[in-house]
């Protein structure tokens, strides 16, 4: 998971989003969850400044963008990904 933390996204809550996501996942930025499913990275500019907080995921189906995210919606997405593994 690559979360944009560039200034425009930070102004829309990306830093708080990242902090809360780390707390929910029990990892720090740059770490991977114990199950190996999620690695959390802070990145600069994913060209979606007006739709932050946002992140991209990379998997077998390619890169997918997730805009206007909340921690709750992100955790639901992670749970759905666990079910497909």
Image (cartoon, rainbow, N blue to C red):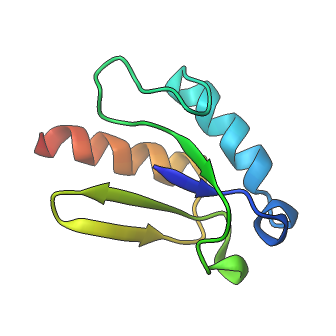
66, 57: nearer the viewer: 57
Q: Residue furthest left?
A: 85
Residue 34 as seen in the image, left or right of residue 45: left
Residue at the (57%, 62%) spot, across then down = 69
Instruction: Return the x and y of residue 33 as percentages of the image width and height.
Output: 40, 24
Compared to 12, does 43 lie above or below?
A: above
Residue 56 drawn above or below residue 73: below
Where does the image place residue 70, in percent across and percent down from the top left? 60, 55
Q: Nearer the viewer, residue 7 or 68?
A: 7
Q: At 63% from the left edge and 26% from the top edge, which residue is drawn?
A: 23
Determine whether, in the image, residue 59 is placed left or right of residue 75: left
Residue 62 position within the rendered picture, expressed as x and y whole percent measured from the top left: 24, 67
Nearer-the-camera pick, 39 or 72: 39
- What residue is at 38 percent from the left and 57 percent from the top? 57
Q: Quadrant of the C terminus?
A: top left
Residue at the spot x=72%, y=57% of the render?
5
Q: Position of residue 76 (x, y in %)?
A: 39, 47
The image shows residue 47, relative to residue 16, as above or below, that is below
Instruction: Classify residue 14 by image quadrant.
Output: bottom right
Total numbered circles: 0
Quarter of the image for residue 21 reads top right
């Amino acid at each position: 998971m690559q979360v944009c933390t560039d200034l425009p996204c930070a102004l829309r809550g990306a830093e708080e989003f990242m902090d809360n996501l780390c707390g929910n996942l029990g990892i720090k930025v740059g770490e991977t969850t114990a199950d190996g499913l999620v690695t959390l990275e802070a990145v600069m500019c994913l060209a979606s400044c007006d739709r932050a907080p946002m992140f991209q995921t990379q998997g077998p189906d390619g890169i997918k963008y997730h805009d206007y995210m909340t921690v709750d919606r992100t955790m639901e997405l992670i749970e759905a990904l666990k079910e497909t593994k």
